[in-house]
Amino acid sequence: MISLLRSSSRALSRSARSLTSSASLPASAPTTTPSSTPATRSSVPPSVAAIPYDPAQIPTAARQQQLVDLRNAIFGTNERAAATDAPPPPRDGSKILKQRLHGPALVRWYGDRYTSWKAWNQKFPGLDLVDLQEQQRLADLEARRKRGKVTPKKGQGRRATMKKK
């Protein structure tokens, strides 16, 4: 990890040197594009693009604000430099939305939920586990059915029979 950071910082300093060397062109060198090619419009302001990068020098607060404004223009964010006294931008929830979802990891950790004996019997055939409460409920239902005390089907209750009379 450290070697990766060192190699990337070396590459950045090399690219910075090439930028500073190309920025210090002699005054006689042409700075405009030839008339045969159409000039491309850059979204980078000339005041920002003309400043060479020096990794040994800490940028000023004004330069940091320029960089923040440029980053906001590129990425469409609403951030501000740390040194400014401006009020914080309105919260948009992007910090939360960028985070990884927790749900799949929790499901993998806790596994499947088996809330009934029937689910256990389906998952592991041959165990033939017995749910005593379900058996008692079915026995009670059968006893009520014999006495004619079960709940009627939907639409077959007292009000439905009164309409037929």
Image (cartoon, rainbow, N blue to C red):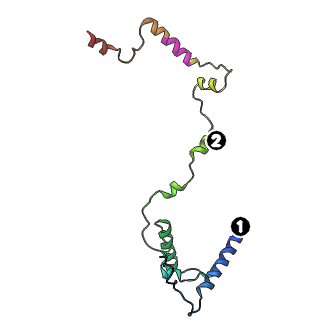
Residue positioned 51% across, 85% down in the render: 32
- Of all residues, the one furthest to the bottom in this rendering is 28
User: At label 1, which amino acid type do we have?
Assistant: Leu
Residue positioned 53% across, 80% down in the render: 49
Q: Which residue is mark 1?
A: 4
Residues in magenta, as a range: 133-141
Instruction: Return the disc, 2 or 1, that comes first in the chain's sequence.
Output: 1
Residue positioned 40% across, 14% down in the render: 151
Whether residue 136 appears in magenta in the rendering, the answer is yes
Whether residue 130 appears in magenta in the rendering, the answer is no
Mark 1, other Cα within 10 Å: few <14 / some 14–19 / many ≥20: few
Q: Position of residue 118 (x, y in %)?
A: 59, 23
Q: Using the rendered view, name the quadrant where residue 28 is placed.
A: bottom right
Q: Main secondary structure of the magenta part?
A: helix
Q: Which residue is mark 2?
A: 109
In the drawing, does residue 63 fall left or right of residue 123? left
**Quick one: quadrant of the C terminus?**
top left
Observer able to see residue 81: no
Frontmost residue, 88 versus 37: 37
In the drawing, does residue 94 fall left or right of residue 58? left
In three-dimensional space, the C-alpha distance between marks 2 and 1, rounded to whole angstroms, equals 33 Å
Depicted 158 relative to depicted 109: above or below: above
User: At label 2, which amino acid type do we have?
Assistant: Trp
